[in-house]
Amino acid sequence: MTTVPVTCPSKTYDRPWLFAEHPDFSGDGPLHDFSECSDAGKWLIFVSSGEIDRIWSLIATATEERLLGPVSKCSTALGKDVHPLRSGDYAICCYCLDDDTAGGEELRRILGALRDFGFQHTLRFKRDATTFAGLYGRGSVAYVSGPGSRDYRRS
């Protein structure tokens, strides 16, 4: 995988999110139609300020090369001010369909890719419907994957 130069989240103050998409992703822009799907959701990754630019470059490139789901997004320096997380953290969302009821092949494929990229800490999957309902924090995630695991369990 060749890393494509991308905008650095830590130096972006003109918008709260940066997006990466598959080149053939249908729609009129980031998350068009995909976020309207009731089965859509995202694997959540929280990254420290010192690592965010390198990690986002990896995730954006992997998304554009179809190694992850159709869309990924990353909070920016502006986004940190608008939607603060723990001190110094940025959020990356890797979107996919929640296909758990059909065996979870897509959920596991993307989880496996994230593990291959070195994300060995606990990862959480949150449905977009939960976000749209304004639910955050404890109890808002659908699935959890323990450290290093390539499988997940209901939260």
Image (tube, helix red, strand yellow):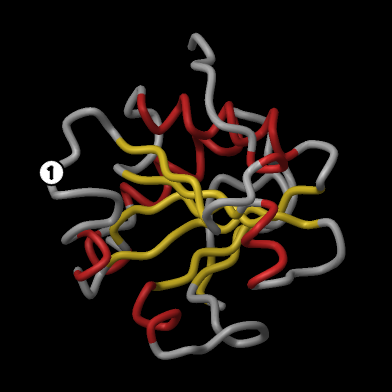
Residue 149 in picture, x, y percent from top left: 63, 48
- Can you give x and y, in whole percent of width and height, for residue 102 in the image? 22, 61
Location of residue 82 by image quarter: bottom right
Q: Does 133 sit above or below residue 43?
A: below
At x 42% / y 83%, what residue is drawn? 130
**Residue located 73% across and 71% down the image:** 84
* Count of numbered marks: 1
Q: Nearer the viewer, residue 120 or 134?
A: 134
Quarter where residue 55 is shown: top right
- Picture residue at 38% right of the left edge, 83% below the top: 132
- Residue 45: x and y in percent read 63, 53
State which quarter of the image contains the C terminus.
bottom right
Numbered disc 1: secondary structure: loop
Question: Residue 146: where, in percent of width, then height?
Answer: 68, 57
Residue 83 location, quadrant: bottom right
Q: Which residue is mark 1?
A: 26
